[in-house]
Image (cartoon, rainbow, N blue to C red):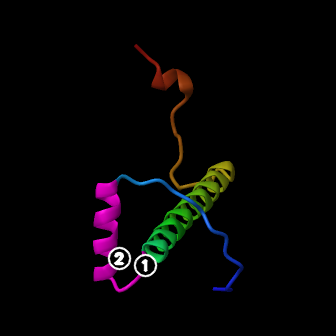
């Protein structure tokens, strides 16, 4: 991964969440900033992967792939009453 310039972001957290985040970051031997940056990177990556998969699936549907089999009955035969 290319190390690109960073930009600071300000967030607001409740005191309780901030306290728990400090404990969590300490347990993981990291900072709250790094903890948040890593989690946001994961979320962005998951979203990008989802969108990529969605585009691929739509592309496959647009190709109208033949999945085998044949229709041996007419439309009227299927709709007989």
Q: How many marks?
A: 2
Image coords of residue 48 (percent x, y): 59, 62
Circle 1 crowding by C-alpha within 10 Å: few under 14, some 14–19, many from 20: some
Q: Secondary structure at mark 1?
A: loop
In the rendered image, residue 71 lying in the magenta stretch gets the answer no
Left or right, residue 17 beside residue 71: left
Placement of the C terminus among the 4 image quadrants:
top left
Q: Residue at x 47, y 20 (%)?
A: 79
- Across and down, in percent, residue 72 comes to 52, 39
Real-space Cα distance between discs 1 and 2?
5 Å
Disc 2: CA contacts within 10 A as few (<14), some (14-19) or many (>=20)? some
Residue that numbered label 2 is attached to: 25
State if disc 2 and disc 1 touch (CB < 8 Å). yes
- Residue 19, percent across and down? 30, 64
Quadrant that contains the N terminus = bottom right
- Residue 54: assigned label: none
Give how far across and how far down residue 15 sits, in percent.
Answer: 33, 56
Queried whether the magenta region covers residue 17, the answer comes back as yes
Q: In the rendered view, tell whether residue 65 sits above or below residue 76.
A: below
Q: Look at 33% across and 82% down and name the residue there.
A: 28
Circle 2 SS class? helix
Tag shown at residue 31: 1
Residue shown at 71% from the left, 79% from the top: 5
Give me the residue at 41% from left, 54% from top: 13
Assign the magenta stretch its main secondary structure: helix
Q: Is residue 70 left or right of residue 14?
A: right
In the rendered image, the vertical position of residue 57 relative to residue 29, given as above or below: above
Q: Looking at this view, is 59 or 20 the one in front?
A: 20
Read off the magenta span. Answer: 15-31
Which label's residue is closer to the chain start, 1 or 2? 2
Closer to the camera in the image, 43 or 77: 43
């Amino acid at each position: 991964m290319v190390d690109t310039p960073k930009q600071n972001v300000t967030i607001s957290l409740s005191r309780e969440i901030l306290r728990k985040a400090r404990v969590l970051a300490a347990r993981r031997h990291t900072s709250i900033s790094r903890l948040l940056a890593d989690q946001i990177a994961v979320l962005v990556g998951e979203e990008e992967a989802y969108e990529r998969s969605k585009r691929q699936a739509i592309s496959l549907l647009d190709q109208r792939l033949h999945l085998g089999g044949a229709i041996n009955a007419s439309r009227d035969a299927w709709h007989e009453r």
